[in-house]
Image: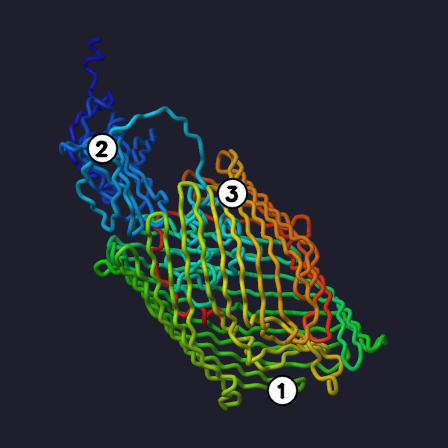
Amino acid sequence: MACILCMPLGTFAQRVTHTYNNVSLSKALLQLNNEQKEYVVNFLYNELEDFRVTATIKNKRLPDAIQQMIGFYPVRMTVKPDDREIYVECTHKADRHLKGTIIDEQGLPLAYANIAILNPADSTLLGVGVSNESGYFAIPYEQDKVLARISYVGYKTVYITCTQPKVGTIRLHPDNYTLKGVTVKGHRLLYTSTDKGLLVSILGTPLEQFGSASDMLTHLPLMMSNGEIAGHGKPEIYINNKKVRDLQELDRLRADEILSAEIVTNPGAEYGAEVTSVIRLKTVRKAGEGWSGNFSAAYRQGKKHYGNVNAALNYRLRNGMDFFARGYLTDQNSQIDATANDQLQASSIWDYQKNAAWLFKTKYYFADLGWNWEINDRHSVGLTYTAFNYIGDGTTIREMDEQTWQDGILVDGGHSKTNTLTRPHMTHSVNAYYVGNIGKWNLDFSADFYDAKSLLEMVGGTENATSVSSQTKKKDQLLAEKLIVTAPVPKGELTFGEEVSTVDRTHDFMQSGFSSDSHVQQQTTIWSLFANYSVQLGSFSFNAGLRWQNEYNRYDVDGQRNDEMSPDYSVLIPRFSASYRTEKWNHKLSYHCSRNNPPYNLLSSSVNYRSKYEYDTGNPFLKPQKAHSISWSSSWKWFYAEAFYQYFKNTIRSFQTAYDDVNHPGVVIMDYRNTPKEEYYGVTLNFTPKFGLWQLNYSTDLYFCNEDLYPLGITHKWNGLITNFTLDNTFTFPHSWLLNIKGNFAPYYESGTTQTKATGFINLRLSKQFLKDRSLSVAILANDILHTQYTKRTAYGGINIRTQYCEYKDSRRIGIDLSWRFNATKSRYKGSHAGQSERNRL
């Protein structure tokens, strides 16, 4: 006993006794770290400074004392007993916290009141917190404008719209009601309906485990296998406020870095006239300074192989500045196999039987350097430079065995080959942006410069025949800027702005005698003004927008302006939607108008060689396509249904006819024409229930197509039901294992001038996340495992010509994905891109 009493006091675990009254958690931790030697307390001072502590700690071990101080804050403590270290960090990384104090009717602090942060647009839950013993709360949040809901048993619930982090003192008033015992069972819904479309949760759902954002997007509700939103066409994609310029950006972004994906099925007037749907990805904002980065690699093997590696590095200063560099390297190889049986009725009846294969070989790199600065919560600026180039020549090889009959007599046959080389040439682009608040007004400005040159060289011909060749030189330049202003107005919000883009494009085509040379210069200037007004009246919300777009074109052929090919346009693009929300249902009626200019390559007048009996060309007389769409959608929990009607004028489609029946008999040329009228009408259904480990995502599309092709000389017309079924099954197992089985089936259908046979696929993906922070992800996958994703079609796509073909695009592939990230700093780059529609046309 005497020996024990004489032992040094340090042999026993030190105890903590303290009283804190509204002291910052950072200051309290620093004090505890300095007062004892048993543990080392590690934390970021700025990260925890907003969390205030009011507590009385009596004779507790240090870990227990810290846990009491943390209370209900979103803060995690990790104790490492081997080296006696304690780590304290905020679990929700954000640069700002909603802070305030809750008191009762007598002015006394209310402890353990519930605070929920909601999205003002649709009441989506963004964050939660609980007040401490002094009534103080601090909750991380990201959105500029939020709705705070403060509730406490026995008091009336209070709603406050917050545009600043500090909300001050909130007084609650008593409310008398009777409590009844209830049992609540449920799970987190995959998406919620909004006035604009669907808001899909990514973080905390199985979707976060799909590796890259590109893979994750294919598993979103309403997403079809061709990359379109059901009933709403190809979406324009944004990452935060930055418009995606090329799809490789989605390969570089990890799915677990995305907080949510908003599917906008009714874009407002602030989007381009050609935009019919939008996907807005919002990333998880993470605080911190210093170095961070990520690395990923992918490999696919089918008949040919595909591989890529991606690396990104970011350095963040304490003052909010980011310096970043990214690199992306790809070795892309693919093959298309096809058979065809075609017939042309001209002065003779020509029949063609073909067995063809296309081989695509491309190596390229993508790199960018950038800087951005979040000056504070209200102002952010940035600049990025992007470079793209091929490594060696990009190669497209087409080989074909063909037999040609004229009036039933075999007149030609043999093997032909064309080889097209894309020579390396650097492409440059620069984007600058400013996003900020001036008073209650929000400004979003972007400016872009894009410069690209290309050189294509083609050599082709048949065996034992003189070869043909051509050379195509192109040069594209784009300058654009865009300004969006958002201002609060009585009972609503007004968004207005302008967008200007100018394009200068030259296209020089020279060939060896099978057609004619062409030298074309195109200049296009587009400027637009737009305004969008939204208002909420009780359970109803309304949104109306108008875009005024003006286009000036100049088309020069061999240095001379062609007035007929240089039309000017001035058009109005209206958009409208009305929503009605009940406790369980959300209904929306919308009208959407869109307008698409032809891609620049389809306006070419050069005649290109494909084979001895096949040429193709563009059409400089193409008109813009205009579409009107009316839809009604209803949603309830995990059920979504939409009925739609779409009217298209001047749809652009390929068209085949005889090239020159006298001088080039039997040669078929493909060009592009405007269809006078097309109509689509149908329904889309989506179900996303969750049963334990099983997340189901089932989609059905049923629609009809009505085309008017008589003015083009095509008499065939079918109007059958077109259907598409997708069953996407995701199973989430313990220890971060995930299994996905996705199947798609499109039955036989007849529509317009085509008959298409049934097709479909089954894809499998198995993934596992490793390391304590799940920063390492490995996935193996197998696509089209039954080898059924064929396209088999009979089409009457021109005057007196019928095409029957079967095509397979090397879809059956196995592969592996690897990704790893380190540290927590996430890019704050907020720039969008001006003139994106013109970039897409180029």
- Say which mark, if any, is on residue 132: 2
Q: Earlier in the sequence, mark 1 or mark 3?
A: 1
**In this view, 124 is above or below 393:** above
Tell which tag, 1 or 2, sits nearer the viewer.
2
Amino acid on which disc 1 is placed: Ser
- Say which mark, if any, is on residue 688: 3
Tell which tag, 1 or 3, sits nearer the viewer.
3
In this picture, residue 66 sits left or right of residue 119: left
Cβ atoms at labels 1 and 3 below 8 Å apart: no
Q: Position of residue 94 (x, y in %)?
A: 30, 47
Q: Nearer the viewer, residue 41 or 118?
A: 118
Amino acid on which disc 2 is placed: Asn
Helix, strand, or loop for circle 1? loop
Residue ID at (72%, 64%): 794
Residue ID at (50%, 50%): 216
Q: Mark 1 points at which residue?
A: 516
In this picture, residue 285 sits left or right of residue 251: left
Helix, strand, or loop for circle 2? loop
Amino acid on which disc 3 is placed: Thr
Q: Where is residue 648 in the image (x, y as percent from the top left)?
A: 54, 67
Quadrant where the image shows the N terminus: top left
In this picture, residue 188 sits left or right of residue 150: right
How many angstroms separate mark 1 from mark 3 (CA)? 56 Å
Residue ID at (66%, 87%): 513
> What crowding class fits label 2: few (fewer than 14 Cα within 10 Å), some (14-19), or many (20 or more)?
many
Cβ atoms at labels 1 and 2 below 8 Å apart: no
Q: Quadrant of residue 196?
A: bottom left
How many angstroms separate mark 2 from mark 3 (CA)? 38 Å
